[in-house]
Image: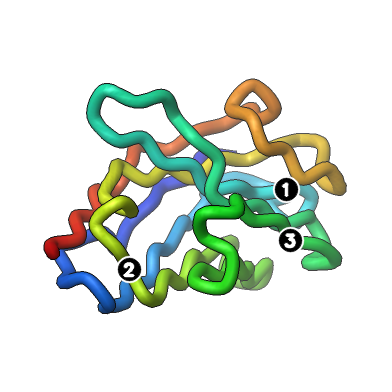
Amino acid sequence: VQPQASGGGLVQAGGSLRLSCAASGRSFSSYAMGWFRQAPGKEREFVAAISRSIIRADYADSVKGRFTISRDNAKNTVYLQMNSLIPEDTALYYCAASGFGYRLGTTPGEYDYWGQGTQVTVSS
């Protein structure tokens, strides 16, 4: 499966964006999906993850209550709805797929396939 993220852009603080990640290939529904982000000079960090059957989701503490991850297996797509954005959310956002479909990985090493990122910039 090959993920491809889109939907980034420039938004003012307090605004919203929805990122999409379309995955090509078979068996998308069997993969757990995750979102990560990387700001300049910082390590890639976990944002959110969702299991293969939408049973469970997990979030970084920094985005809980503001971001929501969801997926539409019929469309081979996972989404990240981002509300109440703050400048600290500025980063390159990546989506990734894990073959361990029921595990909500929080580290990059737990994911097998990565797409190129989409830039999110939040102005103050």
Amino acid carrying label 2: it is Leu
Instruction: For mark 3, give the secondary structure.
Output: strand
Q: CA distance from mark 1 to mark 3?
A: 10 Å
The mark nearer the N terminus, 1 or 2, is 1
- According to the image, label 1 marks what residue? 32
Q: Position of residue 46 (x, y in %)?
A: 55, 40
Q: For this rendering, which residue is in front, 24 or 112?
A: 112
Residue at horizontal 32%, vertical 57%? 6
Residue at horizontal 26%, vertical 23%? 41
Label 3: few (<14), some or many (≥20) within 10 Å? some
- According to the image, label 3 marks what residue? 57
Which numbered mark, 3 or 2, is in the foreground of this view? 2
Instruction: For mark 2, give the secondary structure.
Output: loop
Label 2: few (<14), some or many (≥20) within 10 Å? many
Amino acid carrying label 3: it is Ala
Q: Position of residue 101 (x, y in %)?
A: 81, 45
Residue at horizontal 36%, vertical 75%? 84
Q: For this rendering, which residue is in front, 67 or 77?
A: 67
Q: CA distance from mark 1 to mark 2?
A: 25 Å
Q: Are marks 3 and 2 in contact (CB under 8 Å)?
A: no
Quadrant holding the C terminus: bottom left
Q: Position of residue 58 (x, y in %)?
A: 71, 56
Amino acid carrying label 1: it is Ala
Residue at horizontal 68%, vertical 67%? 73
Which numbered mark, 1 or 3, is in the foreground of this view? 3
- According to the image, label 2 marks what residue? 85
Q: How is the image coloured?
A: rainbow
